[in-house]
Structures are given as structure tokens and as C-alpha cells.
Image (cartoon, rainbow, N blue to C red):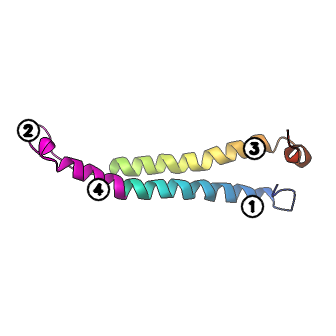
Amino acid sequence: MLNAIGMSGKQMKKMLIWESATYIGGAIVLTVTMGNLLGWLICQAEIVKNQWAFIYHFTLVPVIVCLLLLILVAIAIPLTFYKSICKKSIVERLRVE
């Protein structure tokens, strides 16, 4: 619909990428803060503390790897869907089926 009122393809792609990046950013912030806090709290429980083979060690490497992977997905998926949608004309896209 935004194409019909004058939004260019470049603007549309940029908007879609920023929108998905915002969702990914929110998920990352929640995971890094609340997820790690929850993991730490679980590891502080007596049943876990008394395990002789368990030591809690926090590392950022998996978080960074997942972050990079999620950013790539946040860029690739909107662009892929935008390409498939743009194969139809604006009139065909506006029609309600």
C-alpha cells in the first residue's frame, strides 16, 4: 500500500530491514538481560550448587555469534519477501482476494 502512495522501493527495503532489526534488537536485549539473570538465578539454587561437575561460567561468545546470525536473518528475510512481492504489479498487490 505504501508503494501506491509514492514510497520508493529503496525506502520500502530500508523500512522493512529496520523493522525486523528492531524486533531482533528487542529480543537480544531481553535475552542478554533477563535470560542471563534467570540462568544465574537457576544456577544459584541449592540443588544446582551442590553438583560437583557443574560450574557456572558466563561467556559472551555464543551471544555474539547468535547476534550476528540474527542480524543476517533480519536482513535476508525481508529482502527475500520483498523481491517475491514485487513480481506483481501494484494494482494486483492492492486487490483483496
User: Mark 3: few, some, or many residues within 10 Å (few <14, many ≥20)?
Assistant: few
Q: Which residue is mark 3?
A: 83
Residue 24 place in picture, x, y as percent: 52, 53
Q: CA distance from mark 4 to mark 3?
A: 40 Å
Point out the tag, 4 or 3, that comes first from the N-terminus.
4
Q: Which residue is mark 1?
A: 11
Point out the tag, 2 or 3, that comes first from the N-terminus.
2
* Position of the N terminus by quadrant: bottom right
Looking at the image, which is closer to me, 26 or 61?
26
Q: CA distance from mark 1 to mark 3?
A: 14 Å
User: Mark 4: few, some, or many residues within 10 Å (few <14, many ≥20)?
Assistant: few
The three-letter amino acid code for the residue at tag 2 is Trp
Q: CA distance from mark 1 to mark 4?
A: 38 Å
- In front: mark 2 or mark 1? 2
Point out the tag, 2 or 4, that comes first from the N-terminus.
4
What is the magenta range?
Answer: 33-58
Point out the tag, 2 or 1, that comes first from the N-terminus.
1
Q: Which residue is mark 2?
A: 52
Q: Which residue is mark 4?
A: 37
Q: CA distance from mark 2 to mark 1?
A: 56 Å
Indicate left or right for 21 with 88 as reference. Answer: left
